Image (cartoon, rainbow, N blue to C red):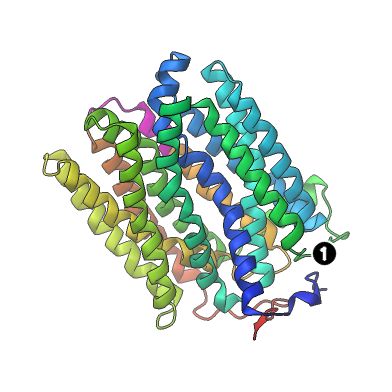
Amino acid sequence: MDHRPWTMRYMTKQRYSVLVLILGALTAISPFSIDMYLPAFPAIAKSLHTTHVSFSLASFFVGIALGQLLYGPLLDRFGRKNPLYAGLVLYIVASAGCYFSGSIELLCIWRFVQAVGSCAATVAALAMVRDIFPVKDTAKVFALLILVLSVSPLLAPTIGGYISAAFGWHIIFIILAGITVLVTIAVIFALPESYQADKTYSLKPIPIISSFLLVLKNPQFYTYAICGAISFSALFTYLSASPFVFIVVFGLSSKVYGWIFAFLSIGFIGSSQVNSMLTRTYKSEQIVNISLLCMVVISIIFLIGSANNWFGLYGTIGMIFAILCCVGITYPNTSALSLAPFSKNAGTAAALMGVFQMAFGTLVSVVVSLFKNHNSIPMAIMIAVAAALAFVILLIGRRMVPEQVAEPVGGESNIMVH
């Protein structure tokens, strides 16, 4: 039985754009929660008398990883919107908790809760892309979501830097809550339910575990989900290490860091849009192969150069820019290839894919925070390891993936744009 409403089958281009915009806004909640407070790290450290502000970032990643395991089954059982509402409300409450936090321990706890709420938006958006759009278009849609997502890295760090300097870091979390309220209103009035509640889907532990195992056994899923998550961890390495590298090592202000962060984000965003053009000519599998190979080469050069002091401020910016370009091309394709085999279990598959991403993101964030080196070498090491490992997994795993993956049963195109 196909649980996707038949009313979703036809829409205008304008409606298509509105859906992409709202889904993009949902996926932007978590990045906004990360990017906006990064420039405030030094201020938070001084305010809370701690040197471990990055632990609040790691706790956020843990919350997303665990929360997605919760929301995946709920989205498949109760439809997409009701669990989404619950997550958005939880996020707003937790943002208020972050505002009132007076210690790093409380901030880490509330950031964890905030992440659990935000991942409902991420998982729901990914599942709804699979619900609404045909498989052959999903890589293009993911690239469009990244275009909407680009508002976060382009604006959030700069805004966060100015807000922290003018009003204090606490206000950042009130603004995040306000943004989420606006997104919630858009979801209520403009985003249709794309998947009807499936009463046959059991929420008992054994059936849920069986559902996860069914997804995990698919070679295409575990190859591209794990490969994509490891390569994507390069972005998390950059997020965790860049405040230290640019503000402490190079001595830049939080405002200047915000502008550099915005510039570097152009690499990730721009390359994801180039990917939309590439998919017209090349298969996603081909694009992933080339982009990962390029990432391996560039990251090794970055590591060797960092170890030998080849790069100053501008050289470091250039190398990170190139690496983020590779990530921006790889991510939409690995995401599309991971979800392609599923229709009924799209929520579960999206949750697992997100868990892989956050698990590796948390790991690299914690590892990077433990380094005491006063240079960019720790960041370069983690990025190089991630690139090489992702490429090796791709080479091994793709041997077990069928060359042609047919549209799954119940997964026929359910949108026709007129």
- Residue at image location 59% in from the left, 62% down from the top: 21
Note whether residue 301 is visible.
yes
Task: Identify residue for label 1.
Answer: 196
Q: Is residue 312 above or below residue 141?
A: above
Q: In this image, 299 relative to 96: left or right?
A: left
Q: Dot 1, crowdedness within 10 Å: few (<14), some or many (≥20)?
A: some
Residue at horizontal 52 percent and vertical 33 percent from the top: 172
Image location of residue 45, percent across then percent down = 42, 20
- Seen from the viewer's position, the closer of residues 329 and 223 is 329
Q: Is residue 129 magenta?
A: no
Residue 376 as seen in the image, left or right of residue 410: left
State left or right for residue 23 relative to residue 167.
Answer: right
Give x and y (percent) for residue 328.
40, 60
Q: Position of residue 344 (x, y in %)?
A: 73, 67
Point 53% across, 81% down: residue: 404
Q: Residue at x 40, y 68 (%)?
A: 288
Amino acid type of disc 1? Gln
Task: Please tell me which residue lies in front, 320 or 20.
Answer: 20
Task: Determine the residue located farthest toward the top in the rendered image.
Answer: 49
Which residue extends farthest bottom? 418
Q: Is residue 323 above or below residue 118?
A: below
Q: Which residues are magenta?
A: 364-374
Label 1: state its secondary structure. Answer: loop
Which image quarter: residue 89? top right
Q: Is most of the magenta stretch helix, strand or loop?
A: helix
Would you say residue 120 is visible in this rendering? no
Residue at the far front in the pictured view:
166
In the image, residue 367 lies in the stretch drawn in magenta: yes
Q: How many numbered dots are placed on residues in this image?
A: 1
Image quarter of residue 251: top left
Report the front residue among 232 and 221: 232
Tell me residue 387's x, y (percent).
34, 53
